[in-house]
Amino acid sequence: MSHQSTGKFIGNCLHKQGLKSAMAPNPITQAIIDFSAGAAGGTACVLSGQPFDTAKVKMQTFPTMYRGFIHCLVSTVREVGLFGLYKGTAPALLANISENAVLFLGYGLCQDAVRLLSRMDKGADLSDIQKASAGSLASIFSSMALCPTELVKCRLQAMHEMEATGKVAAGQRSTVWSVVKTVLKTNGPLGFYQGLTSTIVREIPGYFCFFGAYELCRTTFAKHMGTDKEGIGILPLMFSGGFGGACLWLAVYPIDCVKSRIQVYSLAGKQEGFMKTFMAIIRTEGFSALYSGLTPTMIRTFPANGALFLAYEYTHKLMMDAAGP
């Protein structure tokens, strides 16, 4: 398929998504299609970017152990094998699927809330800033779904370093279920929400930047190409997603670093809250430690978000065609 024909396909797909109420047989079928397409997008995002995410978490929580991104990758493969780069993939998949399901459900509802507050007609087009505000508000709800699974993911990813530095006893089983049992035994169900404050603090400005940059980028492409946002094609669409992701991480990366520290170090005992952890990192390691692991994160954001949007749109189109009007 050529870039031009692929672009028309994506454009038609996005246009049909805007008219989805007319195409779907009923709201339940539409909800299943949206959820399944989001799950496919989240899966593609995780599988294409998981090694970079693993390197990011390792470098955030143990910045002095690695000289840089390449050293982290090589050391991990040499010491625990290639599989070590995919530690935490199962909870990462669950986190991505649950977060995106709640996020985009909330995104639609929050857009309606923004229209109501702005005294706009139902279904009226929102500005890029208004959409960014809706995404920021929706992220509060997605944080509740994301925090437990991300805690398990981060602990699995940094387990080798926790054992190597003596923070936890060596030889422990490192599986999803073993981490879940440890959390329940040590802290109870609320233990899964360690790092929730820093997750919310990260998500609110982060998704404002993400949705704002994504929509602004699509608007810019549309103006230069003399078309609307739905007709910009596949490559500009994927670039817009990557650009939105890059803006998100540049804006909130230090907050994410603090969150990772809290969620991983709490495995060894009670961890201080967000502000105390933040100040301790600056005082003992310097401000630059808050940006440890930024390189793999920025490398990851374009292919991962590109894969997410591509998988979402193709799956959505195929399922809508199969469901029929």
Image (cartoon, grey):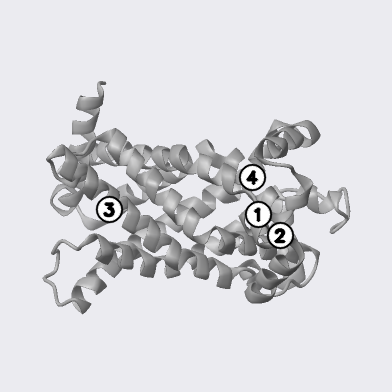
Badge 3 amino acid:
Leu
Find out whether the residues at labels 1 and 2 contact each other: C-beta distance under 8 Å.
yes
Tag in front: 4 or 3: 3
Residue at the spot x=29%, y=42% of the render?
A: 316
Separation of marks 1 and 4 at Cα, in angstroms: 8 Å
Q: Earlier in the sequence, mark 1 or mark 4?
A: 4
Which residue bears the numbered disc 3?
A: 216
Q: Residue 324's x, y, as percent?
A: 18, 40
Residue 113, picture quadrant: bottom left
Mark 4 nearby-residue class (10 Å; few <14, some 14–19, many ≥20): many
Residue drawn at point x = 67 percent, y = 43 percent: 87
Name the residue tied to disc 1. Answer: 154
Reading the image, the residue beneath label 2 is 264
Q: Nearer the viewer, residue 177 or 228?
A: 228
Of callouts 4 and 3, which one flags the residue occurring earlier in the amino acid sequence? 4
Q: For the point 58% across and 61% down, which residue is it? A: 254
Badge 4 element:
helix
Q: Label 2, label 4: how many angstroms apart (C-alpha)?
A: 13 Å
| Real-space CA distance between mark 3 and mark 1, rounded to the nearest whole angstrom | 32 Å
User: Residue 277: where, in percent of width, then height?
Assistant: 69, 70
The kind of residue on which mark 2 rests is Val
- Disc 4 marks which residue? 54
